[in-house]
């Protein structure tokens, strides 16, 4: 069984396309767990109608108090997960028919090596599309001008994972469920899950796009084509935004270290995370020196240059 976690908020425009793509999955053993965050449109009615005609279990939660962010809604949804495997789902995307199947195959292959008691995360590629599903880029990693591999050192300063592209196992899920996570203190739900996988388990990659990742004016979180000259110019003249982004990553690492301090006690990456999280109170030059010395750098190189120039405050 796969638990698909769907965060909802005023999603009526694209929701039916998403739900139809779930129903058309080649792998059928899944249930949908959705949480609405106070929609004012017909989002709830669309889910309720889908539940009546779907051949799958649909569990709908109405947040009594809106979480007011996608990351908080997703972190709350994780507490409802009970199945061996979990996937995040955005309300405006379209899943390709074999998304679950190919991701699960890689998950089982990886668990055979490391065991089901080890946190495992599987990431797939995405097709970046416009609001009408026209292809912008066949590959999300190409669009971001980065590679498809994930390391802890890079994850500390750059989140290049999209939550809708991952599957994680019950062992990883329980790392979150055992703690009371304050979503306001984390960077994003997908980044948090990736940090757990990189620190305590294993990440594997499916080198295939399994989803149409829709970019439109109402995206909660979108993607930028960093290859464009206009993007580079924009970043150059956004010193405050760059510094804040670097500081946000430091604060995320600090909260991660505080949350999992006991679990990190014998972890070889303990000091790396601890020392990185303490950079908030140090100078820009100290930040630059630490990142260079410990190879805690963004990719590609032009991102790392911007990271070091603007530093963190």
Image: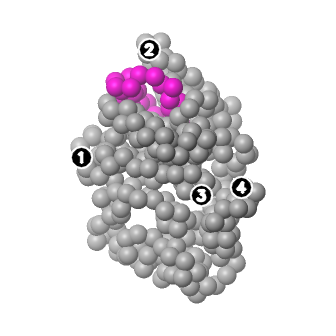
Q: Residue at x 66, y 44 (%)?
A: 176
Q: Residue furthest right?
A: 262
- Mark 4–mark 3 distance (CA, rounded to whole Å): 10 Å
Taking the image as drawn, is residue 84 in sight?
Answer: yes
Mark 1 surroundings within 10 Å by alpha-carbon count, few (fewer than 14), some (14 through 19), many (20 or more): some
Q: Secondary structure at mark 2?
A: loop
Front of the two marks 2 and 1: 2
**Mark found first going from the N terminus, 4 or 3:** 3
Q: Position of residue 180 (x, y in %)?
A: 74, 45
Residue bearing mark 2: 55
**Mark found first going from the N terminus, 4 or 2:** 2
**Mark found first going from the N terminus, 2 or 1:** 2
Q: Are marks 4 and 2 in contact (CB under 8 Å)?
A: no
Front of the two marks 4 and 2: 4
- Mark 2–mark 1 distance (CA, rounded to whole Å): 31 Å
- The quadrant in which residue 186 appears is bottom right
- Mark 4–mark 1 distance (CA, rounded to whole Å): 43 Å
Q: Which residues are magenta?
A: 1-30
How many callouts does the rendering have? 4
Q: Residue at x 45, y 53 (%)?
A: 161
For the residue pair 168 and 42, the one nearer the viewer reads as 168
Residue bearing mark 4: 263
Any mark on residue 199, and which? 3
Magenta stretch encompasses residue 185 = no
- Considering only vertical position in the picture, is 101 above or below 218? above
For the residue pair 126 and 63, the one nearer the viewer reads as 126
Q: Position of residue 34 (x, y in %)?
A: 55, 29
């Amino acid at each position: 069984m796969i638990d698909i976690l769907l965060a909802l908020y005023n999603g009526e425009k694209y929701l039916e396309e998403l739900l139809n793509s779930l129903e058309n999955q080649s792998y059928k053993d899944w249930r949908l767990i959705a949480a609405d965050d106070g929609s004012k449109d017909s989002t709830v009615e669309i889910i309720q109608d889908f539940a009546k005609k779907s051949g799958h279990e649909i569990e709908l939660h109405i947040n009594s108090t809106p979480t007011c962010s996608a990351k908080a809604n997703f972190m709350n949804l994780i507490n409802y997960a009970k199945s061996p495997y979990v996937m995040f789902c955005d309300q405006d995307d379209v899943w390709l028919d074999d998304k679950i199947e190919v991701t699960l195959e890689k998950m089982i292959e990886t668990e055979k090596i490391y065991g089901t008691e080890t946190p495992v995360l599987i990431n797939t590629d995405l097709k970046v599309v416009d609001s009408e599903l026209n292809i912008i880029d066949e590959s999300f990693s190409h669009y971001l001008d980065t590679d498809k591999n994930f390391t802890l050192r890079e994850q500390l300063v750059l989140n290049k994972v999209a939550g809708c592209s991952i599957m994680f196992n019950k062992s990883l899920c329980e790392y979150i469920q055992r703690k009371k996570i304050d979503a306001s203190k984390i960077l994003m739900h997908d980044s948090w899950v990736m940090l757990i996988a990189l620190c305590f388990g294993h990440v594997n990659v499916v080198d295939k796009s399994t989803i149409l990742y829709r970019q439109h004016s109402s995206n909660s979180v979108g993607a930028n084509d960093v290859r464009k000259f206009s993007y580079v110019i924009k970043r150059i003249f956004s010193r405050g935004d760059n510094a804040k982004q670097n500081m946000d990553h430091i604060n995320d690492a600090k909260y991660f270290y505080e949350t999992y301090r006991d679990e990190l006690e014998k972890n070889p990456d303990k000091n790396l995370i601890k020392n990185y999280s303490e950079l908030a109170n140090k100078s820009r030059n100290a930040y630059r020196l630490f990142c260079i010395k410990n190879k805690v750098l963004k990719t590609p190189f032009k991102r790392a240059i911007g990271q070091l120039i603007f530093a963190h405050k």
